[in-house]
Image: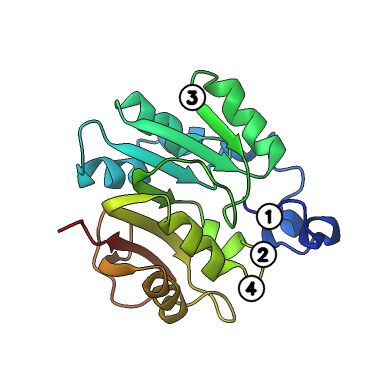
Amino acid sequence: MAVVVQSSLVSEGVTRWSSGARGWASTYDDRWAPLAAHGENIHGEADFVESLNLAEPMTVLDAGCGTGRVAIELARRGLTVVGVDLDAAMLQQAKAKAPELEWIHGDLVDVELGRRFNVVVLAGNVMIFLAPGTEAAAVANLASHLEPGGALVAGFQLMAGGLNLADYDRYAGEAGLELAGRWATWDRQPFVGGSYAVSMHRLAPVV
């Protein structure tokens, strides 16, 4: 998902994603087909992002895009999407499925795309796969890619010893973002505690 580019963190292999997900690229998408076949909605993240309706057309940065499930669905719905990931094998799968989309091989901590988006979305537990200690830097960098009034949306598991919501909110605040909503699921079930949260922080619009 996200690893520090050209630094000792890459060579030492200490990122949470790189240490636990080697070889997943070829089978990562296999989990979704059975769910869809049983009538389950596998596009809750895309539903959420599309519903924000912040612009026409809306621009989205899929940060930690993996094999492209969310980005491809958003593009199918007419949104302008760019996907970023540093797992080369996962990104290759995304490119194979949708070569017409823009896929960037880069790190969320320091990637610079030279443009801003209405929404930056981090689905698939991206925040808890970052290299330990880089979470604040990643949030700050992603916030710098938001249009005024734009939204940073992240869903991730809450586990003992992992990233907690208080720290995540603090990182967002330090990046100039304000909490605009929090839910237990991508379909906006109320958050009353538990092991998963979807958080939306907004960048103040220009007055």
* Amino acid type shown at disc 2: Ala
Upstream in the sequence, badge 4 or badge 3?
3
Label 1: few (<14), some (14–19) or many (≥20) C-alpha neighbours in 10 Å: many
Upstream in the sequence, badge 2 or badge 1?
1
Q: Nearer the viewer, residue 112 or 99?
A: 112
Upstream in the sequence, badge 2 or badge 3?
3
Q: Residue 204: image x %, image y %?
A: 24, 62
**In this orientation, does residue 185 appear?**
yes
Q: Secondary structure at mark 2?
A: loop
Q: Secondary structure at mark 1?
A: loop
**Marks 1 and 4, Cα distance to the nearest angstrom?**
12 Å
Q: Nearer the viewer, residue 70 or 12?
A: 12
Label 4: few (<14), some (14–19) or many (≥20) C-alpha neighbours in 10 Å: few
Upstream in the sequence, badge 1 or badge 3?
1
Q: Secondary structure at mark 3?
A: loop
Q: Nearer the viewer, residue 33 or 127?
A: 127
Residue 101 is marked as: 3
**Marks 1 and 3, Cα distance to the nearest angstrom?**
22 Å
Residue 4 position by quadrant: bottom right
* Amino acid type shown at disc 1: Val
Residue 131 is marked as: 2
Label 3: few (<14), some (14–19) or many (≥20) C-alpha neighbours in 10 Å: some
Residue that carries the numbered disc 1 in the rendered image:
3
User: Pointers 4 and 2 in contact (CB under 8 A)?
Assistant: yes
Q: Secondary structure at mark 4?
A: loop
Residue that carries the numbered disc 4 in the rendered image:
133
